[in-house]
Image: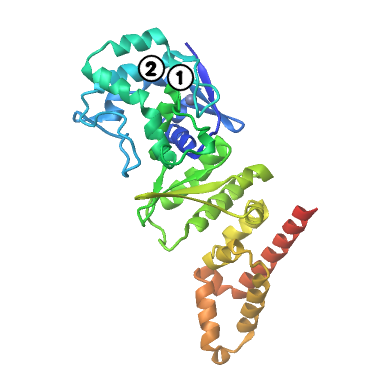
Amino acid sequence: MNYKIILYPSNWLYNAGVMGLIFTYPEYFTFKNGSVELDINLFKNIDYESYYFKDGKVINLIGKNQFYPNYIDTKGNQKDIFIKYFTSFSELENSGFCHICSHPHYINQNRYSELESGDKAAEKFLSKVKNFDMVYNKLLGPSKSKFPNSFWNLNESLSVCHLCSFVLIHHHLVYVELADKSQIFINAPSFKLMFELNRIIKSIYGSGLYDDQTSKREILATSIIEYARKVNVFLGKWTSMNIEIIIKSEDNIDFLSLPFDVINIISDRDIANLLGEIGETEVLKLILDQKFSELIDWAYKILRISFKKPENISKNDKDFIKNLMKLKRNQLNSQEFANKLLKLYSLIEDKLKGAIV
Ligand SMILES: [Zn+2]
């Protein structure tokens, strides 16, 4: 059977789950505009034994922080039911109700009853599946018993369909862990865009070989700049306003996004290319702070210094250059560097004027 299910972006946790699956099983996913098509042959073909279990214990499904639910008994005695349950997903039915997706998919009722009539381990596992909504709610935010909120419509029970629960237990696989032990994920309204942005941060920051002074907003900006340099796309207004970085630390989840003007500027291909050529963190910080006109001050200051005789260059001048230009190629060609700053300013000015019109 060749059966496909279309998944649409939803809340960040679900999106992270879909991304975790795409990074793990790329051959079963096809991007379609902002959504993604899942080939449910995946559930028949996954090598559950070797991917999820090792030495009788569950692997790859256990997160590192307290928010992560133990979906399955970690000692692994629910292995049989785990495999039977997910293999049944190759015949999912579009039915029922789900608080996360608009196209809920559940295991066929007869098949489910069959699974339920299994042993004690099966019973235990399936009761966890039933209560998955509770765990999920804890992950997303405050306890509903303490903080009834409008998003949940004050519902007593939040249904999470079988397919969404499978998606959610893979959410941690996409995170990139930084030197400060926080884990990050970039959320956006399109799976293709999320895939590219997260792939970029994985390749740049996933290795741990980077300056750990890099702020989260610089990481988010860098991913957008690199994406704009690679792909000639214009991020629409709506899209760019909804790109955010999720930062998970030991006991907290933070969300950070960039102002619309900033995303509009750094996602412009010419500007992104020039920023990439310049390659200096101080320049990126200036853009993120939206202090664009300082680019001109900096450029003229660099030019003035470059025309001075070496004996007339003050300590202040030297400190300024040292702080701004970390890269050898810039230090050796300071006049060219200054010209790039001026060009950057004029491109930004044009872009902002364009945005107003
Ligand atoms: Zn669902």
Observer-nearest of 124 and 47: 124
Q: Quadrant of residue 17?
A: top left
In the foreground, 344 or 174: 174
Q: Residue at x 64, y 84 (%)?
A: 307
View extreme (right): residue: 357
> Assess mark 2: CB under 8 A from ligand 1?
no
Residue at coordinates 63% horizontally, 59% vertically from top-left? 274
Q: Work out whether 206 lies above or below 109.
A: below
Residue 8 seen anywhere in this rendered image of the structure: yes
Task: Identify residue type, mark 2.
Answer: Lys
Residue 140, label in figure:
none
Label pair 1/2, CB-CB below 8 angstroms: yes
Q: Position of residue 87 (x, y in %)?
A: 36, 17
Residue positioned most to the bottom = 311
Using the numbered discs, state the Cα–Cα distance from disc 1 to disc 2 in whole angstroms: 8 Å
Q: Which residue is mark 2?
A: 44
x and y, in percent, of residue 290 in the image: 63, 64
Q: Is residue 272 left or right of residue 178?
A: right
User: Relative to residue 350, is residue 105 drawn left or right?
Assistant: left
- In the image, residue 186 lies at what x, y percent? 50, 45
Residue at image coords 53%, 85%:
316
Residue that mark 1 sits on: 40
